[in-house]
Image (cartoon, rainbow, N blue to C red):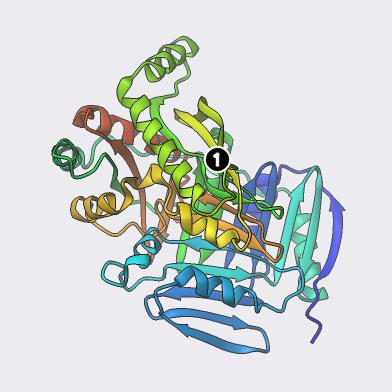
Amino acid sequence: MNRHYFETRVPLSDDPTVVAARLASDGPYSDYVVYESGGTWFYASGCRAELTLDRDGARLRQEDAGEVFMPWDGRPLWQVTKLLDTVTVPAWRAYGWAAFELSYAKDGLDHVGDGRLLHLTVPAAEVRIAHGRAHLRAVDQETLTALLDVVAGAAPAPVAQPKPLDVRGTGEVAYRSIVENAVGEINAGELHKVILSRVVQVDEEVDLVGTYVAGRKGNNPARSFLLNLGGIEACGFSPEIVVKVSADGTVVSQPLAGTRALTNDLIMNERLRADLLGSAKEVYEHAISVKVGTDELVDVCVPGSVEVPEFMAIRERGSVQHLASRVAGRLAPGYGAWDAFGAVFPAVTASGVPKDAAYTAIRRHESEPRGLYSGAVLTVDHNGEMDAALVLRSAYRVAGRTWLRAGAGIVGQSTPDREYEETCEKLESVARYLVPARSAR
């Protein structure tokens, strides 16, 4: 069997978000991942190789190669690295997701749960869209032709208008209570910071592809994604990365912590920005997150290479504005992309300080496992590159249930009123762009 891809390149004048959405809707396979990074959109579907991880261990399935299973040994990301090293597809690139509960795996299986922790696929069909051109790769000529037909297809029918969801009418009492309890725990010295989230159910059926198109127009994300993989459907507009690793070993993380609303009133936005920069609580929350992010990279980077090239800038992300910093370093000899991922995952800005104490608080106070929320959607390839987006500002669907989820960083100075309001501000990055499914219109 020819293991190489059939490839072609074509000029493209359409909006890349619309083309990626068209591929998701009409592409040759039902499963897919769309991932946007730095002005490039990737579409991947079908499967030439698939790697999954759960509490039993890691499995790799490849075309014409059967299955390799590595039982749980307490080093899940080492197993992932070893299995990916055996992928035989030339110039492979894998796409997929990691659940938040993967963060518990280093401490054993007590809190891991029965769900899948990681799902990666090396696709049978792949499209890369950048700079007005589309690069198509497919496992055979027939699939390549099918991709060409979709990429060059007629413009789709107009997407229905979004139907905004009111996120302020649910969960207020319960969320204020857990914030109050967490503040007490912090002031008692149990931890310094924890991100606690709340879930908002979406009762109407939602068109996630249409929501992705509408939401991407209304957001300015660091990364965006749309996926249907391993039983999980989601679309999201990530405000920050977990980690980015380049082929030369450069590694970057991007902690965002400290939030105010972003409105249509420029004068109000300036006032909110000044309030954000002048808030001792928000600056403290941000600073301790940057310190943790720096300490984590020190463990896997060349001594002296870790730096903070950007500190407390303002980043506008959809319905909110954040304090943002960038932490960078160079991987030490013997370390690779998965070592960097393991060092920083989950993002400190979605877990807390110290992380182990934050995990305990999250399990105690939140009503259900997180799953994809505050995990990662990521790409990784044969030459060691990785790009992992933090999964926030997203809509999720599993087994017919659709929901939104958002959290806030709780520190000793937090108040239940402000933290609840912050979850509302973040939820609106998605809630205002929900497109009803055709059956619900």
- State the image coordinates of residue 175 (x, y, percent, origin top left): 20, 41
Crowd band around label 1 with a 10 angstrom C-alpha radius: few (<14), some (14–19), many (20+)? many
Image coordinates for residue 223, horizontal then vertical, percent: 57, 44
Instruction: Point out residue 29 in the picture as x, y percentages from the top left corner.
Output: 63, 70
Secondary element at image label 1: helix
Please, what is the three-letter code of the amino acid marked with disc 1?
Ala
Q: Which residue is mark 1?
A: 214
Residue depicted at 54% across the width and 46% down the height: 212
Left or right: where 71 falls relative to 198: right
Is residue 141 positioned above or below 371 on the image? Answer: below
Q: Quadrant of residue 439?
A: bottom left
Q: How many marks?
A: 1
Residue 203 at least partly seen: yes
Query: Is 411 rendered above or below residue 124?
Result: above
Using residue 421 as the reference point, say whether residue 331 is left or right of it. Answer: right
Who is closer to the viewer here, 299 or 56?
A: 299
At 40% from the left edge and 25% from the top edge, which residue is drawn?
261
Is residue 333 or residue 179 the one in the foreground?
A: 333
Residue 241 coordinates in the image, percent (x, y)? 53, 45
Q: Quadrant of the N terminus?
A: bottom right
